[in-house]
Structure formats: C-alpha cells, structure tokens
Amino acid sequence: MDLSDVRFVKGTRFPLSRLLDKSNSPSDYLGIPLSADPRRVATWDPVIEKCKVKLASWKSRALSFAGRVVLINSVLSTLPLYYMSIFSAPKAVISKIDYIKRGFLRGVEGNKRRLSRVNWGRLCIPKKHGGAGVINLRVKNKALLAKWGWRYATERNALWRSIICHKYGSGELPWMVNLGNIKDASITWKGIISNLQSEETEKWMCGNSFRWQVGDGKIVLFWEDVWYGDKALRSRYPRLYRLVSRKFISVDEMFSADEWLSQDLPALFNRQLLDRERVIVHRIKGEVDRIKIISYVPDRILWVHENDGIFKVKKLSELLMCNGNFEDADLFCYDKIWRLKIPPKKKMRTICLCPAFSWDVFGMHSADGGKVSTVVAWHVSFAAALWSLWLARNEFVFRDKGTIIKDIILFVKMRAFAWCKALKVFEVLDEKRWWDSPGDAAISSEANRILKTVWQPPKFGQMKFNVDGSATKDVAGCGGVLRTAEGYVVAMFFGPVAEINSDFAELSAIKKALEVFSESLWCGKVDLILESDSTVALNWVQNYYVRPWRWGSTFQQFDEDALKIREVKYVFTPRLSNGMADYLAKLGSRRAVMFAACW
C-alpha cells in the first residue's frame, strides 16, 4: 500500500510528506508557540514587548493613579495571563513585567528615576486588605495553572483529558491528576504538576478541598470519595474499610445492590463481620439512606473554598495572597472604603488619608444602626470631607492659598450631594433641605421611598407567600406569611433555624414555606407566588448548579415539596414590602421551637 498520498476528503489528495515535514508545520496554535521552551526568557519576549507598547509612558500622564491601576490590570488580563494559563513563568520574566508596571504607575519616562509613593508589595495586596488590587503575576500564574487540576476532574469526556490519562494515568482517585513520577512528562505538563505539588497550591487544591454532590451516583465512589460528611467513609471507618471486597464501587451500584438492600453482609466483605462491625455497618446504612439518588442529575464535584462549589481563579488568587498573612481587624476599615459609592480616584486618596483608627475617631460606627439612606449618606459625606481637606491642603502647600472652614464645609456638602444623587437609594433627594441639614434630607428620602413601595396582592387563582430570614451574631430565625388574592392572611410560621447564617436563614424560610403550603388544603388548587428579599437564596432555588454543597439535604427536601405544588413562581421583593415576614423572622429567632399554623 502506497502511503505517499492520503485521501482526507472525497476527490481531494494531500501529500503525507508535507504533513510530516516540520518545516511546513505551524509554529503557533491559538497564540501559543508549539515548540517553545517556557523556561527560556526569550520565549516570553513577545509578551514583554506588548506590555511595553500598551503601558507607554505618555498614557500615564493622562491618567490618575486609580486610572493607571485599572489600565495595568486590564492589560495584564489579556497579555501575559494567556501564556501563564499554560506555562509556568520564570522569575526573570515576572520581574521584567513588574518593572514595566512599576514604571508606568509612577509615571517614569525613559531612563528617569522617580521615588515610589507606596511599596510595590503593598499595592499588590487585595483591596479589602488595604492594597490597590494590582494583579500579582506570580500568584495569578499559580492559580491559572492550578485550574488544570479542576478541569481534569470536571471535563471527563474532553479529548485532552483522555490523552493525559492514557499517557500519565490518574491519581489516587479516578478524578485526580497523577502527581507521581513525571520525569518523562513534557515541559508544559511538568510545570502544571510541579505547581499542584507546591506547598502553597497543595493547601487549597488537595483532596480535602473537594466534595461530591450526589446526583445519579454513577461517578461518586461509595468508600473512596467525600460525599457524606466531611471525610470519606474509608477514613471514618478504616478497620471496616480493610474488609470491603469492592473498594471502588460507586454510590449507585452500592444503593442498587441486592446485598446492600437485604444486608447480606458476607457478600460485601471478605469475611464474616463481628457484632461490633455489624453495628457500624447498620449505622452507615442508616446515615447514607437519607441521600436520595436523582437519576436525571449527574454527580457534581465541588470546591469547598467557594460558596457555589465552582473553582474560580480569582478566589484561589485571594487565598494564595492572604494565606493567613492579614488579620481580620484590617478588614473593617479598607473594605468599607472600597465599597463607598464614590469615584475610584477619591477612594485611592481616602485610603492614603484614612488610617485604620480614623473610622472610630470620626464616629463611623455611629451610623451603622441607622436607616440605609442615612448610613450611605454618612459614608459618602465622610469620603467627601477627606477629599475636600486634601484639596485644601494642596492649595495651601503648593499655591500658598488658604481656605476658610465655611468654604470647606460648603465644598463637602456640594460633593457629597453630587455623589449621593448618582445612587439609586436617593431617588428622591430634596436639594434645598440638603443644604440646611443633610441628615434630615437623607431621612426624608428614605421616607419618600417607603411610600412608593407597598405589598401587591396576587391575581385571582394565586396565593402569595412572603418569607424572610434573620441572623445576628448569636441567633437566627425565619418567618413567613401566606395571603390570598383578597389580602387575607391564611397561614404563617416563625421559628429558629439550625445554623446561624443569614443566607441559610433565608433558604430555611423558603423551604418551610413550601412545606407549609404543600401540606395545606390549597395545594394543587391554586398557584403559589413565593416572594423573598434575598437574591442569593432565590438564585440557589432556581439554579441547581450554583447551590452550596453543605446544604444539600435542605435542597433535597425543598425539591420534594416543590414537586407537590401545581406551579411555583419565585419573585424578588424589596424589604420595604416584606415587613410582616421580616418581623416574624426576627420574632422566630427568639423562639426555641418552630411555630406554624394554617386556617
């Protein structure tokens, strides 16, 4: 047989010699050099040159400090990070790119030198810890490479995974990357494995960082994987595990096995069990039988460091950056500043002007217990005062121009009013009243907004269940009220919840409302509208794949009750129109048991 020509498409010929000739093969694929050695600095020269062009010195003169930070991060997100998602960057490359970034941030032109205002390491710290949020390339490179471990576990049918699995094998479990002998691995894959094995990354990407949410049970291993509780069954019962005859049996196979259903223990273990071992088996069966197999939902692996269980490079970067280096005490001040509804340039200056103790000195906590509009107005006015003082100081130092206190107060009110008017919470803000008393103007704005928001009754043939959750540092509760189309209250509940968490309290309120309605005489006769003021909880109940893994049993009960109801519509409602449910939730947090009644 002559292999000189190979027929790819009917009527078309392509010479195999050209296909095998390296000189004719492309050097790049999707922007990544195919035969490049990432350990050589020359491989990264195109990236470094592009950074120099994008971060030209003339651009820094036209931007504020905050604008330069934004441009630096936007450039980094499109240039070196693409290479860094595949290759492990050498230290020399990171140093060169950081040198370009530092020069751009300082406004350096040519070979001129200029002193830095702030330490570079401080600027790379996350914003909520007092930094400027400049991307740390070394940390981002580690997070991007670590994502391949997540992709290996989730993309089970991908071609690249099949090739890697065939060439290097899997790890201790089928979904884990093999971290063993990789001497013969390619440079690219060796860099990915070395990153996963590093002490920094392994802390957040080891087997203990993953859990399984059981769906159809065909992938999750009964004994090996962590799917019930915080540990795998083999770790919780090591002596019993040594006697298991089929160690890599899936949950679905175990649950459907006749030996498990009939408790024919000799068929599941290598020898006859002792009485104490039988007790352990019965205890395991009693626990895991609470988990129900959902045949139409695939098993799902979860990353425990994220609430929705989905791995995110941004979250891992934060974990690698923090890694216990920052105290919780720092979170209050800087997190408050970055969440202020003011221009970014003013936020930067506020960070510089306001040390950690300033919030207490200026009475920031005095507004924390007030109404929403009052608190926001106080925060914005505080930032406006700092910015006005800074500008007045510059006028005095550089232009020898003094400013009287009355003018500074006027500038503070003017800037604070302009910034507040841009916020949605101040839809109705009386300008004349603001100049006399900003606090009274903020309160009246809140009152006018309340008048616009009232509870709307459902249509005929529908009933509306308003629910809410409440949580403090010590207690948590939930409550709800069911009304007819005429506005009559026909059911209510309020009581404590098992976990002190505001999101869990909102979720418990929704679950209890469905339980009360499914057991009522209206179930199957009318449609149900369920209103909540929590967008997080409503997103969880409507989207299966974003649900937190640790509350899996709660979601299972929720799905069972929802199937009993003819139709359920989940609607967000502002807290102002959810007053009765809010009152019942706070009342329920002080109770010892749940109260529920229908009439």
Image (tube, rainbow, N blue to C red):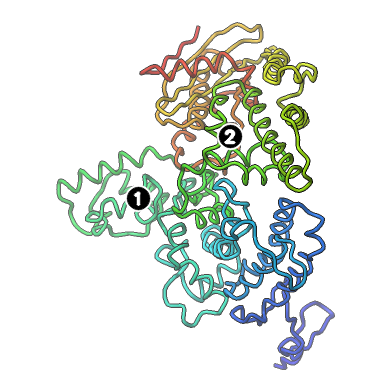
Q: Secondary structure at mark 1?
A: loop
Q: In the rendered structure, which amino acid carries the disc numbered 2?
A: Val
Residue sitting at x 79%, y 66%: 56
- Going from the N terminus, do you reach mark 2 or mark 1 first? 1
Q: Which mark is residue 231?
A: 1
Horizontal side of 492 relative to 236 (left or right) equals right
Task: Using the rendered image of the protein, determine whether residue 73 is visible from the camera's viewpoint.
Answer: yes
Where is residue 193 drawn, in percent x and y?
49, 71
Q: Nearer the viewer, residue 258 or 395?
A: 395
Where is residue 470 drawn, in percent x and y?
49, 24
Which image quarter holds the N terminus?
bottom right
Query: CA–CA distance between discs 2 and 1?
Result: 28 Å
Q: Is residue 408 above or below residue 597?
A: below
Horizontal side of 448 relative to 530 (left or right) equals right
Residue located beneath label 2 in the image: 536
Front of the two marks 2 and 1: 2
Q: Is residue 549 above or below residue 143?
A: above
Horizontal side of 241 relative to 192 (left or right) equals left
Q: Is residue 580 above or below residue 227?
A: above
